[in-house]
Structures are given as structure tokens and as C-alpha cells.
Image: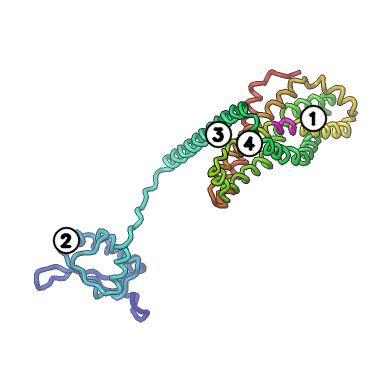
Amino acid sequence: MTGSSINQDIPPTLEVVEQGSGQRCVKLSGSWNLRNLVTVPELNRKISSYAAHKNMQWDMNSVEMLDSVSALIIWKAWGKKLPDALQMKPEHQRLFERWQTQELPESKQVGSNSGLIIKYMNQLLSNFLAQLLQLVTLLGQLVLDIGYLLRHPGDIPWSEISSTIYESGVRALGITALVGFLIGIVLSYLSALQLKIFGAEIYIIDILGLSTIRELGPLLAAILVAGRSGSAMTAQIGIMRVTEELDALSAMGISHSLRLILPKVMALTIVLPLLSVWTSAMALIGGMFSAQTTLDISYQQFFLKLPDAVPLTNFFIGFGKSAVFGLMIALIACHFGFRIKPNTESLGNETTNSVVAAITVVIMVDAVFAILFMDVGMP
């Protein structure tokens, strides 16, 4: 491209001239820029038709101006290669040399919306199955580790289990108590508004007892632990990946599953049922407080009526499902932790995925328990 003194408004022209030797020459002249080419759309078709003749000569010495877009259009019309007999200015030659030394990106054909949806669904399904297989593999390795520890009790990582119980259980007592107490107040207050209409205030004890001990207590504790402790476990393993501590453990011959996964799984399996009992107790206390305020049901009456309203089987159902919740949360947290790549972006993404997946699995498992034990423990 030449200096600013060139008149850029000269329209591009293309003509075929006969030379003395009988050869035909395609002569280009004018200002070949994108603005001028838009006004003469047939030039591209003419260049392509003349380029089909291999013995055609090309003369571009009369081209006053040539920008990179026009050079690319001419280059494609030539079939992405320079003609054998070509004359042009040196500054224009450099534009075409650029296309000779690099590959042009091929345009991808955009499929239909249905095809894209099917491809996206297949990708989601394959990713889900791959992660499910990795979780099953992790669970199988956990079973093998438990079998090994039963034969070698001295290798049980008591310190790791103890520290995880403290971090995931003891330090979570405050938040679970607060949430359980507030949920109990809200549930009792909303139930009281409806029971007053039918004059059935005494049945608030049945509603609070069944819903809290059997469902809300274990579910609330599991969701809080998944968001608080599950994310911390995933981030901890991810940081070990970033700082290459996992590689150091492998180099020293220390099993990742025995020292990292097993303590977390055992600790959450032990501590989450206890947290669910604690959360349920605080929710019942909040419900009693609200029932005494709104319905004038005394604390003594609440305590006396509760064992008859809620059979003991519901306590064991909630206790058992909490153990399963703890197992699944720890497995998912470790699974996504080991998927983290040694960069901070992957650390944040996988930690978020861990929390979302853990809460989703907890709700799904709770639904399975609700269906399996539908007729068990009902008064």
C-alpha cells in the first residue's frame, strides 16, 4: 500500500489485452480496496474465470492501491496460489507472501439447531458417564483401602480423621444450630397460620417432629456441610495439586486414597449423622419457641406429645441417610479435587462444580430414601 497522496477513489478495473506474442494478459489497475470492491461485485467472478486459464498472464503494475482484504480476495480467486506469469509492485508482493506462508482457517459449516442440540446432549452424557465411572473407581479403591486397614490396623490415619472431624463437625456446630433454629421457627409459624383455621393447633407437634427429624434436619446439615466442608476439601486437594504436593506424595510412595480420601470419607460419614441430630434438635427448639408464642403450646406439652407423634424409626431413618450423605459429599469433594489442573482458574471452577454436584446428589439420594421408606415410620 502506497502513501496518502494516492487517490483512493479510483475505481478498480480489470481488462484483458492482447500482447504481440499472441499471449493474453489480464491487466489490473485503479485502487483495489474494500470500499471500491463493494461497488463492483463482478470483479471477483471475472478473476476466478480468468484464473482457470493456466497460460494467462497477469499484470498488476498499474494498481495504485491494494489493501490486505482485496489481496485476500484476489488470492482466493487465484485458487490460493500465485499465477506463473505475474507482474506486480514489490510492496504488493509482500501482501501475497503473507498468505503463502500461513494456512487460511477453513470455514466450518454451521449445522442445524437440532444437530447442535444433539451434539451438546451427547457431550453432556459422555461427560456424565465418564465422571460416574471415575466415582465408582474411587469408591472401589476406598473399599480396597478399608480391607487393607482391617488387616493392618496400625496404618489407620487417626490424626487425619480426627482433624477432619474437628474441621467439618465441631466448627460447623454454630452455623448448623443457627440455621436449624431459624428454620424451626419459620416452619412452626407458617404451619400455625394454617392449623388455626381448622382448630388443629396440637398437630403442629406432628408436623414439626416428622418433617424435622426425618427430612429437614439431615437435609439442612448435609447442604451446609457440602457448601462449607465439601468445598474446603476440594480446594485443599486442588492447592496440593498446584503446589505439586500430590506429586511429592507419589514420589515418596504414599497412597493418595489412603492418606487423603479415606480420612475425609470416614470423618464425614461419622460426623454428619451427629450434625443432623444437632440440627434437628435446634430446629425443634425453634419450633417449640414459635409454637409457644403463636399457639400457646407449652414446652412441657410439646415434649410429652413428641414421642407419640414421631415413632423412633424416623430417627434411625434420618440418622442412616445422613451417613450416606456424608459418604457421597466426601467422595464428590475428593473426585473434583483430583480433577483440578495446576492453575487457579481450574481450582475455582472445580470447587464450584464440587459444591453444586454434592448438593444435587444429596437431594437425589434424599428423594430415593423418601420413596424407599414411604410407608416406614408413619404414626
Label 1, secondary structure: give it: helix
Q: Which amino acid type is marked by label 4?
A: Ala
- Apparent side of residue 182 relative to residue 343 in the rendered image (left or right): right
Nearer to us of marks 4 and 1 is 4
Work out which quarter of the rendered image holds the N terminus and state it: bottom left
Q: Which residue sits at x=56%, y=29%?
A: 144
Sequence-wise first label, 2 or 1: 2
Q: Which residue sits at x=57%, y=41%?
A: 336
Residue 194: numbered disc: 1
Sequence-wise first label, 2 or 3: 2
Q: Which residues are magenta?
A: 270-275
Question: Between marks 1 and 3, how big is the CA–CA gap?
Answer: 48 Å
Question: Between marks 4 and 3, how big is the CA–CA gap?
Answer: 11 Å
Q: Which residue is mark 3?
A: 138
Sequence-wise first label, 2 or 4: 2
Label 2, secondary structure: give it: loop
Q: Which amino acid type is marked by label 1?
A: Gln
